[in-house]
Image: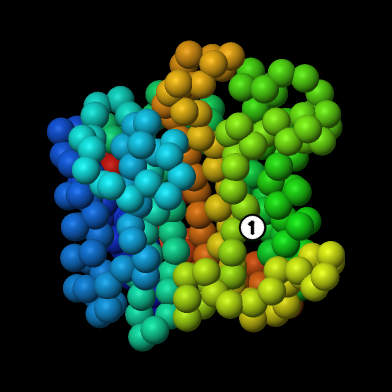
């Protein structure tokens, strides 16, 4: 699984360095798969998602036929399959190599939630605890940005965050991308055990047609995803070879 993660990380880095305004989404998809195979992977572990601009706000977007436009973000969700094992990485980065201020505000909030949840991937932590923590961090941040109005605890109770964050925090990973295994035993959320690998992938998606949201955030979709191994000594991020700090992404793209 570490090899699968390394191969996918290399592909994501190559995509960041290659992307230019005017390209098509499918060109990045083709580049990813070429890198996968060049490094010995059987191919993609699932249908790659390459969503530019507003397409990044569409969950499970797989058309990959749009144009990469100057000033937009590109969301790439792609993983390699190596000797039967899967990897699963998402990165979101600016097509022209520089985040705008609104893009950076959304990005930094998602990254804060993602890194905070990664630290919780330890034996004994439940899936529900992870998801709840991501909801709390994102909701509080979205209130600060003006995407949501009201008290965070009330907004969470009423699930208002689902307007922008409508999926789970992550899933177990292994021979299948969504690997087998129960997430609940009856009503009880399953606790992580040493040796489990799971994805951690919070996101914020501001569809361009949403009302009552600041205009500057419309059409921005951000997801950040890593593959994390739970160990007795804490979390081990298998996909750490692809940058996710905004400054590191901009520096890599500048090369």
In this rendering, position of residue 81 left or right of residue 121? left
Q: Which x, y percent locates residue 40?
A: 25, 80
Residue at position x 52%, y 65% in the image:
227
Q: Which residue is mark 1?
A: 118
In this rendering, position of residue 112 left or right of residue 86? right
The total of numbered circles placed on residues is 1
Which quadrant of the rendered structure holds the C terminus? Answer: top left
For residue 83, above or below residue 59: below
Q: What SS does tag 1 mark?
A: helix
Q: Residues within 10 Å of mark 1 (few under 14, many from 20)?
A: many
Residue at position x 27%, y 78% in the image:
42
Residue at position x 58%, y 14% in the image:
212
Does the rendering let one see residue 227?
A: yes
Identify which residue, 169 or 16, lies in the foreground: 169
Tell me which colouring the rendered structure shows. Answer: rainbow
Residue at the far front in the pictured view: 186
The part of the image, by quadrant, that contains residue 233 is: bottom right
For residue 178, above or below residue 31: below
Q: Which x, y percent locates residue 194?
A: 70, 79
Q: Which x, y percent locates residue 169?
A: 62, 53
Residue at the far bottom in the pictured view: 83
Does the rendering let one see residue 101?
A: no
For residue 133, above or below residue 162: below
Residue at position x 80%, y 73% in the image:
185
Identify which residue, 255 or 187, lies in the foreground: 187
């Amino acid at each position: 699984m570490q090899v699968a993660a390394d191969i996918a990380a290399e592909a994501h880095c190559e995509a960041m360095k290659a992307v230019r305004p005017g390209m098509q989404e499918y060109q990045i998809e083709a580049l990813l798969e070429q890198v996968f195979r060049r490094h010995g992977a059987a191919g993609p572990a699932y249908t790659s998602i390459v969503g530019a601009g507003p397409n990044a706000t569409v969950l499970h977007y797989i058309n990959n036929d749009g144009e990469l436009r100057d000033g937009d973000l590109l969301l790439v969700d792609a993983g390699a399959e190596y000797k039967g094992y899967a990897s699963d990485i998402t990165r979101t980065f600016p097509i022209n190599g520089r985040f705008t201020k609104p893009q950076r505000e959304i990005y930094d909030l998602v990254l804060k939630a993602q890194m905070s949840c990664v630290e919780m991937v330890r034996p004994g932590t439940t899936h529900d605890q992870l998801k709840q923590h991501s909801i709390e961090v994102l909701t509080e941040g979205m209130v600060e940005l003006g995407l949501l109005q009201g008290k965070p605890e009330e907004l969470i109770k009423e699930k208002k965050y689902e307007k922008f964050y409508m999926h789970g925090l992550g899933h177990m990973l292994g021979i299948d991308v969504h690997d087998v295994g129960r997430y609940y035993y009856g009503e009880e959320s399953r606790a992580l055990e040493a040796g489990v690998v799971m994805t951690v992938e919070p996101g914020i998606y501001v569809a361009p047609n949403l009302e009552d949201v600041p205009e500057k955030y419309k059409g921005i979709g951000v997801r950040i995803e890593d593959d994390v191994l739970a160990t007795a000594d804490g979390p081990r991020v298998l996909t750490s070879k692809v940058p996710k700090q905004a400054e590191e992404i901009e520096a890599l793209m500048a090369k």
